[in-house]
Image (cartoon, rainbow, N blue to C red):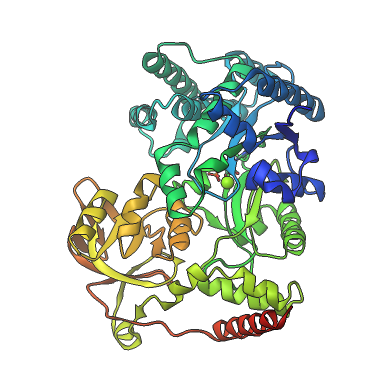
Amino acid sequence: MSKKYVYLFSEGNASMRELLGGKGANLAEMSNIGLPVPQGFTITTEACTQYYEDGRRINDEIMSEIMKNVETMEQINGKKFGDLANPLLVSVRSGARASMPGMMDTILNLGLNDDVVAAMIKGNPDPKFERFVYDSYRRFIQMFSDVVMEVGKKYFEQLIDQMKERKGVVYDVDLTAADLKELAEQFKAEYKKQIGENFPSDPKVQLYEAIRAVFRSWDNPRANVYRRDNDIPYSWGTAVNVMPMVFGNLNENSGTGVAFTRDPATGEKKLMGEFLTNAQGEDVVAGVRTPMPISQMEEKFPEAYKQFVEVCGILENHYRDMQDMEFTVENGKLYMLQCRSGKRTAQAALKIACDLVDEGMIDEKKAVLMIDPRNLDTLLHPQFDAKALKAATPIGKGLGASPGAACGKVVFSAEDAKAWAERKEKVVLVRLETSPEDIEGMKAAQGILTVRGGMTSHAAVVARGMGKCCVSGCGEIKMDEENKKFELAGKTYREGDYISIDGSTGKIYDGIIPTVDATIAGEFGRIMGWADKYRRLGRQGP
Ligand code: ADP
Ligand code: MG
């Protein structure tokens, strides 16, 4: 019998993470417990390994299994690739066994081409819908080119900037349908110029290229750095998830969000998250626009919000752990796009483990196992001296995205952070926003301060993973990255000036505030007590 390389979501479950990757296994699990998940399939990590064994090629057997599953997906969803009445659009998403946020590549809106776009617009003459279609199209060409053909983001960003300048607008959302249509044409021309071939219009060809790109992205430099830092073996490979698109950018009655069932910084039991109306997933995660807190979603989307709160309860009960989720609301209806056990600070890990025991969700042994000993040392990171802190006046405030205290000299790029740190300088990396290319610089810095982005922005997520202090989304900063300076509270800060940041409160201070060692909270003692108890019981065993 030959190996099975592709699983519909309905054929998988959470225990299959080695084969389906974390994202795929959890999409299958969510779908099996009845949560609203767009129905697609997962190509296994073994298919990825096979791709490398076959000399970076998807062999015919695997390709035909993928195409069979495309047909099944078309039937389940009542839509077809390239169909003019009911076109199927999909996302192609990487997903390794261990979560690697933002490390590999995702393509959205795959399946669009000139004919499909024209048919969609013909079927719905609303000018806002036309704008949505062209926005989706230009995003797809942009992502496909960038990811699949490695054309480089900057060409497309330049074209967008030129268009905005020509139209005299500041934000993407102010571009009209006609502007976006023109952009899509420009993007295709750029693609042809760079690659020497026409942009592929056949959705099946698009899919094939996209899957190859995800397999290839397993081996890209930033994924390799992340794996090295997180002890993830190269041999694991990544799975690929193919699933129908839902559109948070359809209209004002749509949006997209990310949320945690508990506070990932403190562990407090309350829904934490962010939501952007009329936006597609990547807008939130990329931290390009600063989103609204999830509580405001309740006002705008009462029905979907209610349903989402229910889903959070179901997921926590099911997984018995704090969950990190991605979701989208299309025309008022909720769809779940991802869930996983949420990354958290050491402090939050202790609180959540103790709370789950008190709530009767887990036993003491499980609580001990939930604490990653490697993270406990972050509890011993310095905090600001309380007296000095009281005396200091903040010059600004962002979001307390990852706790701890940091002070150092301002630098404006990851390269500078690394170079200065190598000279034994303590630095705070200040950026508009961070991206995966900044990881080495973030590691070298004492702390990270960003102008844009929320609690789930790249900077925040990565900093929490590193146990590094981070303040994100300080919109008061007037940033001039190019000239290595920023303005805050009426003062200009240049490279080398001292600032201090507090990752718990989000406050920013001028100059140096002395730090002291952290005190350890009560939960630490409780968990250590349980650890001792079970270690001793273990020793008495046979
Ligand atoms: P990452 O691992 O970087 O989070 P994802 O594969 O999760 O990448 O996708 C990036 C973004 O695209 C997420 O915000 C996700 O919610 C969104 N997205 C992925 N698939 C779909 C889909 N089928 N419909 C709508 N949004 C999607
Ligand atoms: Mg994701």
Q: Quadrant of the C terminus?
A: bottom right
- Most extreme residue toward the top is 197
- Residue at 70%, 41% (x, y): give it: 331
- Image spot of residue 335 (x, y percent): 71, 45
In the image, is residue 42 above or below residue 130? below
**Which quadrant of the view contains residue 172?**
top left
- Most extreme residue toward the bottom is 387
Ligand 1 in which quarter: top right
Q: Is residue 464 visible from the viewing direction of this image?
A: yes
In the image, is residue 525 above or below residue 85? below
Q: Quadrant of the N terminus?
A: top right
- Image spot of residue 520 (x, y percent): 48, 84
- Residue at 60%, 60% (x, y): give it: 342
234 on left or right of 124? left
Q: Which residue occupies the foreground of this view, 265 or 376?
A: 376
Q: Which residue occupies the foreground of this view, 478 or 414?
A: 414
- Image spot of residue 475 (x, y percent): 37, 57
- Residue at 52%, 68% (x, y): give it: 265
380 on left or right of 541? left
Q: Which residue occupies the foreground of this view, 79 or 241?
A: 241
Q: Which residue occupies the foreground of this view, 486 or 64?
A: 64
- Image spot of residue 221 (x, y percent): 39, 39
